[in-house]
Image (cartoon, coloured by chain):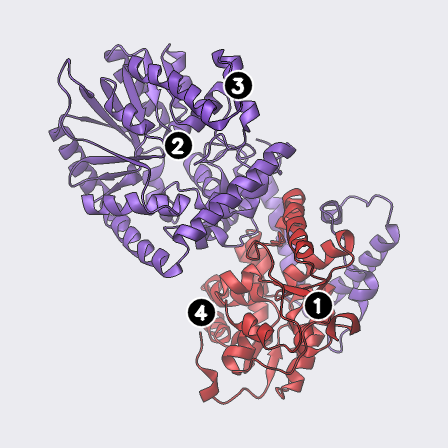
Chain colours: A red, B purple
Amino acid sequence: MPGNASTERPPRGAAIFATCLAETLLPEVGRAVETLLERLGLNPHFPPRQVCCGQSLFKAGHPRQAARAGAAWVRAFRGAEVIVSPSGSCVAHVRKHLPGLLTGRPDLAAQARALAARTFELSEFLVRVLGRTDLGAHAPGAPWAYHPSCGLHRALGEDEAPYLLLNALAGEKPLPLAEAQRCCGFGGPFSVSHPEISGGMLAQKLKSARQARARVLVVGDVGCLLHLSCGAREQAPELQVLHLAQILAGVAGPEAGR
Amino acid sequence: MNGRLLPESKPRTARALAVFTARLRQMREDGFGDPAQVEDFRRRARAAKLTYLSRPEYWLEMLCQRFEDAGGRVHLAGDAAEARGLIEGICEAAGVSKVVKSKSMLGEEIGLNPALEARGVEVTETDLGEFIIQLAGERPFHILGPAMHKDRGQIAELFSDRLGITVGDDPAELTQAARRVLRERFLAAQAGITGVNVAACATGTLALITNEGNGRYCAGLPPVHIAVMGLEKAVPTLADLAMFVTLIPRAALGARLPSYVTLAGGSLGRAGGAGPRQRHLVVLDNGRSAILSSRYWEMLLCLRCASCLNFCPVYGLAGGHNYPGAYPGPMGSVLSQLLCGQEGGEDLVHASTLCGRCRQMCPMGIDLPGMLLALRGEMAEKGVLGQLSNLAAGLAAEVLSRRPLFEAAKAGGRGLLRVLDAWEPRPLPPGPWRAWRRAGRRLPSASGAGREGRRG
């Protein structure tokens, strides 16, 4: 984990890596990140050539094609002082796999390594880089729970930052979620190649939320957010699924953010 | 198996699966939940295994020497057929017609029981769960609980149908009934076949762990003992062996010690006395040397503790019988592919969200998700379907590397969402959205996704 930030100069301009999934299907997440970073005085900007880090291609078993998307990602973010993303799994890909995928192109690989060291998942960035936990945000107005996403909690091994942020929210504390660490069943291509099992895992997660009597489920990854919100839309209309960024930015909508 | 991995279809079995795996998860968390302790074991256990695996031929030779010094015989088998042939030969030479066997995943891997039965040898599985599924003519459902999918009513029915025993469905009564049958089989058997959990090369000692003590009878009662092990099961010293004997039950059940540990390899019994007069160790390669020299060598650290099954959300829904091959769950998805590159393997390596829970819970820290990923990459290069999917991935990479193309695709995607939205509630036209929809998911509404971000 890159250093104890409080001793360092806070970054002046944060590049938002919105992710292709959020841009296509969940644009409100990128906007929430922008609102939040703006309020923190970080001059967020959106590198205009960004698309995708290549994670989904890599996980589908296409490393060469993933390397092409990854190379474009490196070019798009080249020169960014710090990169912030609302998706732990994308950050994990950038940090752990992308430099290795580009070994055939040493110049790009070196840039990828340098960028990887400056790329952070949102909660990591807020807590570890900025040293902030209390951002003056309010917990959802309805009973709520937090689903720890696999990308953030396991792939990045970040088991503290999101909880510190959640605990600092004003208002109600989160409800305990049964089997919280169990994956929601998204898994990118898996959600389409194995709909029966993916759907079964989704149903289990929604059941945990229901049993916890949660009306709002907060997640920290755009993959889980897409999966769980699409599931809730069909199976649990009373449940609202929101990204942590939306809570922290206070843009979660009147029924949840009050 | 054709097609894709599906959830267990029988509701009763699916419920039993959920209850059983939840209980094992709880036991593991209660008894071996301290990450620092797990890390400490992992470090020592990996060191011992790596010492062995860095020079397996040296250590194996030592194991053979010590084992044979004590009167045993070691046989090396290159593949499953050779191992079956060796065991058949031992049985034939010793005039064995009745065998008692303790649970062995390796036995499943090489298809030992059908081979012996085809030669007229009667094999009795003596682990209670294995005994039950043998009566039912089924495959193990779980590495630790092969019959976990059977409830007591079904077991009572099996006992009545196959053994002619009328017995209630009280678990204690059922166990007593099985015990009475097994006692006679133990006494009548001319050979006992067991697996090996860990072998110490420096002393030629085999350790066998069981929950019911049946392994002790199999290894110690009949005149002939045949132990079968994969060549990865050895460790250098007896101290290493002792560590693994306490690590395996910790990982599997959260227990600090196994119920029964049987050490075999000491002196043999005399004619007319108690104990085996012949002890054989069959060491099987069956693709393991190739694994050792490949990028998947870490798979040889696997202890068959079933942690990855118990914590895998996919296994938790699919259950053991939907996996082709002897080994189910995440370790099975990798190992079956490496051992035999079997049919259905391509589907299995994709039947994972790569959530990482298996790696987190593995007592040896095996990077199962990493290996699934690598296997996906290797397979994508092969076959017609592979070429097609490569082509599609190439197109996707093109779109995902160029902002203008992505913008166009995004606009197209939003249009598609609007079309699909308007299509409801009629059945959707073919396409990935149908799979998405079938799993109880509705895509975001076009209006939601269409709201243009300031810069999105």
**What residue is shown at x 27% (from left), y 14% (from top)?**
B190
Measured from the top left, where is residue A67 in percent x and y?
A: 54, 61
> Residue A106's mark?
4
Q: Which of marks 2 and 3 is in front?
A: 3
Which subunit holds the residue at mark 4?
A
- Could you tell me the amino acid type at mark 2? Met
> Residue A23's mark?
1
Which subunit holds the residue at mark 2?
B
**What residue is shown at x 47% (from left), y 23% (from top)?**
B174
Query: First in sequence: mark 2 or mark 3?
Result: 2
What residue sits right under mark 3 in the picture?
B158
Helix, strand or loop at mark 2: helix
Residue B374 appears left or right of B437? left
Residue B293 visible within the image? no
Residue B333 appears left or right of B53? right
- Relative to residue A252, is residue A103 depicted above or below? above
Residue positioned most to the left = B69
> Residue A55's mark?
none
Q: Do the residues labelled 2 and 3 touch (CB within 8 Å)?
A: no
Helix, strand or loop at mark 4: helix
Measure the C-alpha gap from mark 2 to mark 1: 48 Å
Quarter of the figure with the N terminus of chain B: top right
- Relative to residue A90, is residue B286 depicted above or below? above
- Relative to residue A151, is residue A32 depicted above or below? below
Query: First in sequence: mark 4 or mark 1?
Result: 1
